[in-house]
Amino acid sequence: MKNIVVIGAGTMGNGIAHTFAQTGFKVNLVDVQEESLQKAMKTIASNLDRIIAKGNLTEEQKAETLSNITTFTRLEDAAGNADLIVEAATENLDLKLKIFAQMDEIAPENCILATNTSSISITKIASVTKRPDKVIGMHFMNPVPVMKLVEIIKGYSTSKETFDRIYKMSENLGKVPVEVNDYPGFVANRILMPMINEAIETLYNGVAGVEEIDTVMKLGMAHPMGPLQLADFIGLDVCLAILNVMYDGFKNPKYAPCPLLVNMVTANKKGIKSGEGFYDYSESKKAEKVSPMFVK
């Protein structure tokens, strides 16, 4: 597999494209908005500069990596010779089903269709295609170029050949693939999201403040980042979407999103991506606690 298509130029999509391109794959990066594609390429270039500054990449390797990426606004123009398509769109079931149906119609017969979903059923996604044996989950972690883990999720019909090829490819990317079965939240988010949700509940109940909760988890539990800061980093809307998937899938109240999380997303306080979440990321107020109006 040499020709890779990545759908979605957001944080995960550009990170996935960066990782494949830096490893020598030819990557077609697709997004419906040209502006998003331009922003993604600037982000990739900036991230490559950081690697150069650490002495782990040369200017020539940066240029080669960027030359491996071609941008498109139409999947039809990008997927004709694809060996693997990785969907990295918003964590929304209806959108993913629509994209996979389109991918199935356009992609070559032997092309593997992968999704970077962090919680949605691979079996459900595969059901809208005529090649469920070639549909698989590749759940990369953010930031993709840095984080080693990739959850490889098998749907009900995913073939052993497909799994083996994606597992090996992930190793070739320098990642550590972990085999996971297809249940809501998989492993990473089934464990992580209840912890984040409980941290939000702790804030909501007035037990402690934002910085205090994060400090306890960093210093007491050796977490590199507190759960509320991590939620901001992931995106509060993404956290809410994942919790809703698990709540719907397991029908267990322990996965019900905290009302504070729901209210913050409704108020467009989504974390780093919106400039404010549990912390304020504006230039004038970086790393300050969120306004008290969002605490209750």
Image (spheres, helix red, strand yellow):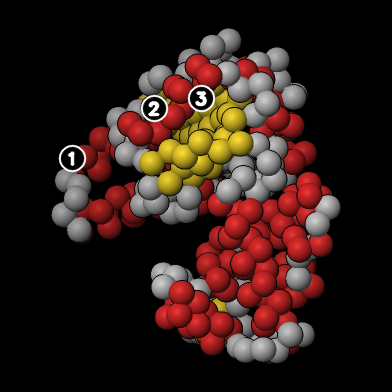
Q: Secondary structure at mark 3?
A: helix
Is residue 30 visible in this depiction of the protein?
no
Q: Toward the viewer: 266 or 157? A: 157
Quarter of the figure with the N terminus: top left
Q: Earlier in the sequence, mark 3 or mark 2?
A: 3
Q: Which residue is found at the position 68% from the left and 41% from the top?
A: 183
Quarter of the figure with the C terminus: bottom right
Q: Secondary structure at mark 1?
A: helix
Q: CA distance from mark 3 to mark 2?
A: 9 Å
Horizontal and vertical percent position of residue 35: 54, 47
**Which residue, given by chain and number where applicable, does mark 1 sit on?**
60
Is residue 89 visible in this depiction of the protein?
yes
**Which residue, given by chain and number where applicable, does mark 2 sit on?**
168
Rendering quarter of residue 247: bottom right
Amino acid type at image mark 2: Lys
Q: Toward the viewer: 251 or 85? A: 251
Horizontal and vertical percent position of residue 32: 61, 38
